Structure formats: C-alpha cells, structure tokens
C-alpha cells in the first residue's frame, strides 16, 4: 500500500501542474513550434519461468505515456519487477544448530510510479514539475517519494539525436528499511536524457536521474538498445544501475533490507507502441 504521505506528495504535484500554466503564461512566451502533438506511448513486458528441478519466476513490466501540445508536455510512467526463486534459508534445528533448507520465496519486489508536467517556454527551454515514487522491499529504503520543480533545456535535437537535461530543487519523503517512521529532506534533482538513431530501425537510449540530499544521493542510469520490428512492435534490451551512496546501521537488524549500495538489472522485453 502506498503511504498516505506519498499520496499527499502526488496530489501536490497535480496541484503544481495546474498552477504552472498561469505562471508560465505570464512570461509572454509563445507556443513551441513542435508540429506534432497528442497521445503516444508504449508498454513492455518480460517474463521467464521454470518448473521441475528448478522453480523460478521473473516478471518485469513498464508503461510509458506522453501527451504533447504546442505549450505542454505531460509524461506518465510506471514499472514493476517481481522475482521468485528457490533460496537456501537457515532455520533453527535440533539442539539449536542452524539447518539450511531450500524455500521458494520472493527475491525481488519493486515498483516505480512517476509523472511530470512541462510548460514549454520556447523551443529550447521548459519549466517542469515532477513526481517519483519508488517502493522496494529489498532496498535500503522501503520507499522514496520525490517532488521537484526543474528547468529543462534541449541541448541538441535533430532527426537522429535528442539530448536534454533537467535541473532543480525539490523535497523527498522516505522511510529507511526496518523503521516505522518517515523522514523529509530537501533534494537537488538532475536528469539527463539521450537518444541516438543508429539505423533506420535501431536506436540507443540513455536516461540518468540523480536525487542528491544530505542523508543520501540516489542515482539511476538506464541504457537501452531498441530494435523496431514494425510500426507497433520492438525488441528492447536494457541495463539499469541504481546506486545509493549511504546505508544505515539499522539495515543490519532487518533481514529483508538491502545491504548493497548498488543494484543492477538486465532485461530483454517485447515492446508495443501505440
């Protein structure tokens, strides 16, 4: 269940998104000559399962939606990862000795939700409000919910290349694994997005996100190779690195908490574009 404080942050993001038009319209900036608008999006799915001598299940899914007009860019995304597998678990045995037994357990359970509203100021600049909620049962932080207002700038855009960044202040609500109370901290948020068309049906994408705070700096980098098979279907190979700069001693008291600063994820998915 999503904590109530995170729902408040999400509601604040929606209020901020509705307030930005009045603020931005007063700047006198004209609409962007984007030329294309409306809804677009994609969904992707990867699944692997084994039975018999080995039991395992692995599922990862993602949904990406975008609405573009001459003055606004709205972006919504979500992803989920869940794994189950056979692991050895130590349980008390006769005489108090530890006995290792094989149990079929959940070994990964993570989902992320995000959204943004970007007011286009001119063809190269925009004002963006963003919200991101991340829940992970096997991370050093049970959840992290961030709200930020950023300046976005397009550094390079041509038929084959897209490069832009976002930078601004924000606030984060988080809970350390093993604790029952949540904390709030100011953050500096930065994002870098890059896309390069390699051939007529192949492109490479890279998305970098950094949320820096006094208690911890969270960084996530995702690199993907996308091969378009036809107008609707594509194959996507992605490699994601997630890193927290600081862990807490309380994690050692919680067997379900993560004790590694860096997590990696390699996926091969079928993508449907709409």
Image (cartoon, helix red, strand yellow):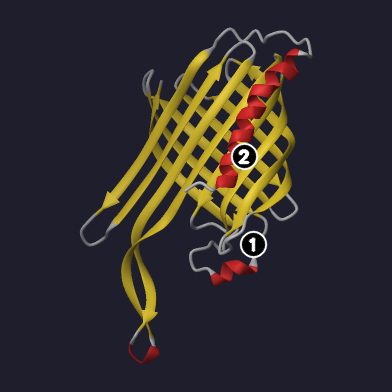
- Classify 235 as above or below 35: below
Q: Is label 1 in a helix, a strand or a loop?
A: loop
Query: Could you tell me if residue 217 is visible in this image?
Result: yes
Residue 164: image location, x then y, percent? 67, 26
Rendering quarter of residue 34 = top right
Residue 263: image location, x then y, percent? 54, 53
Rendering quarter of residue 47 = top left
Relative horizontal placement of residue 55, taking residue 87 as reference (left or right): left
Q: Which residue is mark 1?
A: 247
Judged from this view, the residue extending furthest toward the left is 52
**Mark 2 crowdedness (10 Å alpha carbons): few <14, some 14-19, many ≥20:** many
- Classify 108 as above or below 236: below
Label 2–label 1 contact, CB within 8 A:
no
Relative horizontal placement of residue 168, taking residue 141 as reference (left or right): right
The numbered mark, 2 or 1, whose residue comes first in the sequence reads: 2
Q: Nearer the viewer, residue 271 or 180?
A: 180
Residue 4: image location, x then y, percent? 56, 46
Q: Nearer the viewer, residue 12 or 99?
A: 12
Residue 192: image location, x then y, percent? 66, 33
- Classify 100 as above or below 118: below
Residue depicted at 77% across the width and 13% down the height = 26
The numbered dot on residue 9 is 2
Relative horizontal placement of residue 217, taking residue 227 as reference (left or right): right
Foreground label between 2 and 1 = 2
Q: How many marks?
A: 2
Judged from this view, the residue extending furthest toward the bottom is 95
Residue depicted at 28% across the width and 50% down the height = 49
């Amino acid at each position: 269940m999503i904590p109530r404080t995170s729902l408040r942050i999400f509601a604040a993001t929606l209020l901020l998104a509705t307030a930005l038009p009045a603020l931005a319209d007063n700047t006198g900036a004209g609409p962007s000559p984007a030329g294309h608008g409306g809804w677009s999006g994609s969904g992707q799915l990867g699944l692997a399962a084994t039975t018999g001598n080995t039991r395992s299940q692995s599922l990862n899914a993602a949904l990406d939606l975008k609405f573009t007009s001459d003055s606004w860019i709205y972006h919504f995304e979500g992803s989920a990862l869940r794994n189950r597998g056979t692991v050895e678990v130590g349980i008390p045995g006769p005489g108090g000795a530890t006995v290792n037994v094989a149990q079929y357990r959940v070994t990964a359970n993570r989902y992320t939700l995000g959204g943004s509203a970007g007011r286009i100021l001119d063809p190269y600049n925009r004002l963006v409000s963003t919200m991101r909620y991340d829940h992970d049962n096997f991370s050093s932080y049970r959840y992290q919910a961030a709200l930020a207002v950023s300046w976005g700038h397009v550094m390079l855009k041509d038929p084959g290349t897209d490069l832009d960044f976002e930078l601004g202040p924000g606030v984060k609500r988080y809970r350390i694994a093993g604790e029952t109370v949540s904390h709030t901290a100011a953050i500096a948020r930065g994002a870098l997005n890059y896309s390069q068309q390699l051939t007529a049906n192949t492109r490479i994408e890279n998305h970098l996100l950094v949320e820096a705070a006094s208690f911890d700096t969270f960084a996530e980098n995702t690199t993907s190779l996308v091969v378009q098979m036809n107008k609707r279907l594509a194959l996507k190979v992605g490699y994601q690195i997630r890193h927290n700069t600081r862990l807490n001693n309380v994690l050692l008291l919680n067997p379900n908490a993560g004790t590694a600063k860096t997590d990696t994820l390699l996926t091969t998915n079928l993508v449907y574009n709409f």
